[in-house]
Image: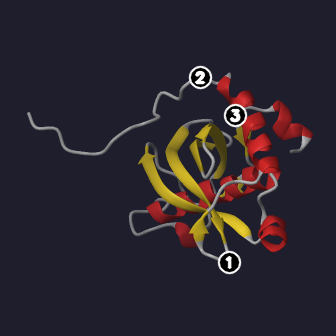
Amino acid sequence: MSEASKTSAPFVGTIQTVKPEWIDYNGHLNMAFYNVLFDNCVDEAFIELGLGPDYVKERNASFFTAEVHICYLRELQEADPVRASVHLIDFDEKRAHFYQELHHAEEGFLSATSEQISLHVDMGLRKVAPWPEDVLARLQGMKALHEGLGRPERLGRSIGLTKK
């Protein structure tokens, strides 16, 4: 991990910009591109953990998304600068659970949250496989750093209609 990621909790990604082609007919960021913004930040965080493109080439393994839950809280417009974060909640021998927030980078408002489970995958077999020991150690380091953040208020939300 880099020095920045060792001292920052949560992991905060680089500033991204909402592209014109991502705006839908409602005049705001289309829901699909929130995933792109969140995923770009996950890639940055996991590269810091040694799980980027080099990991795939050298170890023939990667991580795949198993489940995501996004909450859309406030609209984003074309050219808005945004910054996403990653808070590692937990992990086990094959999975990682993390929570993300997407903030407007200038105005600071929370635009969306995302909660995700990722799986470590052997790319040769295309099956879930245990994390290597060195990766487990880096995950433990990140988790220890992130434990000081406490439980995110919006973590563990479910979806459904309540009857009155």
Label 2 vs 1, first from the N-terminus:
1
> On screen, 79 above or below 56?
above
* Nearer to me, 6 or 122: 122
Spatial CA span between label 2 and label 3: 11 Å
Label 2 vs 3, first from the N-terminus:
3
- How many labels were placed on the picture? 3
* Residue at the spot of label 1: 124
Q: Quadrant of the C terminus?
A: top left
* Nearer to me, 78 or 132: 132
> Which of labels 3 and 1 is toward the front?
1
Q: Position of residue 140 (x, y in %)?
A: 73, 36
> Which of labels 2 and 1 is toward the front?
1
Task: Give the SS element for disc 2.
Answer: loop
Q: Position of residue 132 (x, y in %)?
A: 76, 54
Tell which residue pokes out farthest to the bottom in this image: 124
* Residue at the spot of label 3: 143
* Nearer to me, 147 or 95: 95
Say what amino acid the circle numbered 1 marks.
Gly
Task: Give the SS element for disc 3.
Answer: helix
> Residue shown at 69%/30% (left/top)?
146
Say what amino acid the circle numbered 3 marks.
Lys
Question: How many other residues sit within 10 Å of disc 2, few (<14), some (14-19) or many (≥20)?
Answer: few
For this view, does 77 lie left or right of residue 129?
Answer: left
* Residue at the spot of label 2: 150
Q: Position of residue 29 (x, y in %)?
A: 50, 60
> Residue shown at 64%/24% (left/top)?
149
Q: Quadrant of the N terminus?
A: top right
Say what amino acid the circle numbered 2 marks.
Gly
Q: Are marks 3 and 1 in contact (CB under 8 Å)?
A: no
